Amino acid sequence: MLDDFNFKVLELERKLTLDEIEEKLMKMKDNPGNFNRLGERGARFVPDSWEMPTLYFALDGLTLEVVTKDLDIGDVEEYLCDLAQVLGCKIFGEYLEYW
């Protein structure tokens, strides 16, 4: 089932710096991508695979926006579980928890 919502705002279990996030994401071998600093906006991680969501990390170290438009929601949820493992902390949504 494709998600037509556009994006989801999630929260990390604990605060991480952008340096910590970048270091952990760059070690992902199964889902490589590009990490870009966006100044006041925080940072963006764009996976090499177009079938994976783009991630935006806020400067507060807790807020995560996930672009889900036209992606299979099951794949997105699996990706978020993998991401939680890589970051070493749970990711919380309004009704869901990824770990």
Image (cartoon, rainbow, N blue to C red):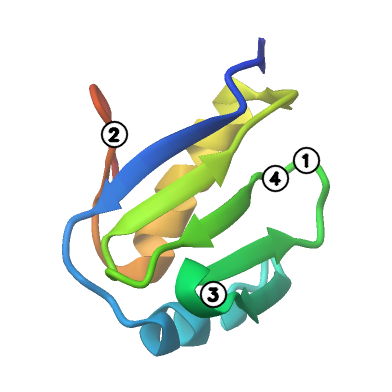
Tag of residue 51: 1
Q: Earlier in the sequence, mark 1 or mark 2?
A: 1
| Residue 17: image location, x then y, percent | 32, 82
Residue type pointed to by label 2: Gly
Q: Residue at x 56, y 55 (%)?
A: 55
- Frontmost residue, 7 versus 71: 7
Question: Residue at image x 57%, y 24%?
Answer: 74
Image spot of residue 98 (x, y percent): 31, 41
Between tags 3 and 2, which lies in front? 2
> Mark 3 or 2 closer to N-term?
3
Measure how far apart labels 4 and 3 are at the Cα level.
14 Å
Of the two numbered discs 4 and 2 in the rendering, the one whose residue sits closer to the viewer: 2
Q: Dot 2, how many residues are within 10 Å of its Cα: few (below 14), some (14-19), or many (20+)?
A: few
Task: Using the image, determine if residue 76 lies above or below residue 15.
Answer: above
Circle 3: element type: helix
Q: How far apart in space, not on screen, are marks 1 and 3 (Cα)?
A: 17 Å
Q: Earlier in the sequence, mark 4 or mark 3?
A: 3
Determine whether the residue tagged by mark 4 lies in a helix, strand or loop. loop
